[in-house]
Amino acid sequence: MLRDLINLKKLRDAALYLLFCAAAVFLQDSVIGPIRLFGVSMMFVPAAAVAVGYFAGGVWGAAFGLVLGFLSDISFGYVALFVALFPLLGFFAGVLSRWYVNAGLFAYLCTCLAAFAITAAVQVLFAALGSGLTASMLVTALIQTLWSLPMAAVLYYPARAIGRPGA
């Protein structure tokens, strides 16, 4: 009777997306994070939240965005910045893919570009509250946004494979 209540496909997908999120944060923090362009690191974890939202729906995007937010805040030393931001990105990516755009690579990359720009803008806003807004902050945000985009394309295919097996 209890076995009838458990959806094994959703459990498998949840475990795979959890592994996907942990791998994305590990790559961001340890492997690809130290690679810098003009002194700026990639910040591609928002692309993982967008990918889960795109292929699993807005609710799953928000839930795994929360997981990514917790892991990112612990990793990067912020206090609840990404916990508040990544669930919103995952949820709205799921809404976009369900109702407004297709789940193709180009639309996904455009959504990731918007997510990267929002993440960089929020980071700049938090930094500007403490020391004032400077032109170098805006240049850094622009470089970070564009530098993170290639890694978003890499995250697209594993997320699509989990969300749409055989596609």
Image: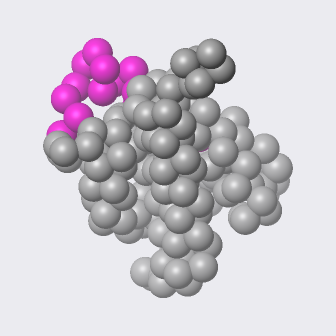
Residue 105: horizontal and vertical position, in percent?
Answer: 20, 46
Residue for point 59% across, 60% down: 22
- Judged left or right of residue 104, residue 14 is right
Q: Residue at x 42, y 26 (%)?
A: 57
Magenta stretch contains residue 92: yes
58 in magenta: no
Instruction: Tell me if residue 45 can be seen.
Output: no
Q: Is residue 29 visible?
A: yes
Q: From the viewer's perspective, is residue 40 above or below residue 4?
A: below
The structure residue drawn at horizontal position 29% and vertical position 15%, both measured from the top left corner, is 99
- In magenta, the rendered stretch is 85-104
Taking the image as shown, residue 47 lies to the left or right of residue 154, namely: right
The C terminus: image quadrant: top left
Magenta span main SS: helix
Observer-nearest of 142 and 32: 32
Say which residue appears at 58% left-offset and 18% top-offset.
5
Q: How many marks?
A: 0
Say if 32 sits above or below 140 in the image. below
Along the viewing direction, whichever of 45 and 12 lies nearer the viewer: 12
Residue 36 drawn at (x, y percent): 48, 82
Residue 28 image position (x, y, % from top left): 54, 69
- Residue 150 picture quarter: bottom left
Q: Quadrant of the N terminus?
A: top right
